[in-house]
């Protein structure tokens, strides 16, 4: 059973989805600058460590609400 979560989406190019595929967590990040990147995690703590490195709080000083929404979406995976 595959369970899909949409983390954020601004348009068809800038989006992030997470699929729970059995014991694997597959994260797809699609960007108009970098194309598509896929990351596979074996546990939620490993994914959250990546999330905290990728979305550091310093980058969202001006938009703290967006930061909180992204982190909350990942915590619900």
Image (cartoon, rainbow, N blue to C red):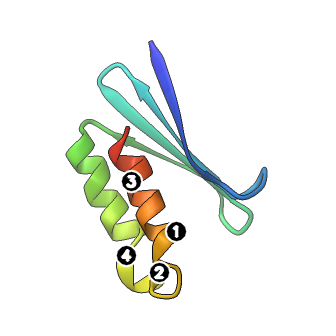
At label 4, counting other C-alpha atoms closer than 10 Å, the crowd grade (few under 14, some 14-19, many 20 or more) is few
**Inter-mark Cα distance, 3 to 2:** 14 Å
Element class at badge 1: helix
Considering only order in the chain, which callout, 4 or 1, is on the residue closer to the N terminus? 4
Q: Is residue 22 left or right of residue 39?
A: left
Secondary structure type for disc 4: loop
x 41%, y 69%: residue: 55
Density class for disc 2 (Cα within 10 Å; few <14, some 14-19, many ≥20) is few
Which residue carries the number 4 mark? 56
Provide the residue designation for mark 3: 72
Mark 3–mark 2 CB contact (< 8 Å) = no
Query: Are circles 2 and 1 on residues that touch, CB within 8 Å?
Result: yes
- Decide: few, some or many residues near mark 1? Use Cα within 10 Å; few <14, some 14-19, many ≥20: few
Residue at the top extreme of this rendering? 1
* Whether label 4 touches label 2, CB < 8 Å: yes
Q: Relative to the observer, which residue lies in front, 20 or 41?
A: 20
Q: Which of the marked residues, 2 or 1, is nearer the chain's N terminus?
A: 2
């Amino acid at each position: 059973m595959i369970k899909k979560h949409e983390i954020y989406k601004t348009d068809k190019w800038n989006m992030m989805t997470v699929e729970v595929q059995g014991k694997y967590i597959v994260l797809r990040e699609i960007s108009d600058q970098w194309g598509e990147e896929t990351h596979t995690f074996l546990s939620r703590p490993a994914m959250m460590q990546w999330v905290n490195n990728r979305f550091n709080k310093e980058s969202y000083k001006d938009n703290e609400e967006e930061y909180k929404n992204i982190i909350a979406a990942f915590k619900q995976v």
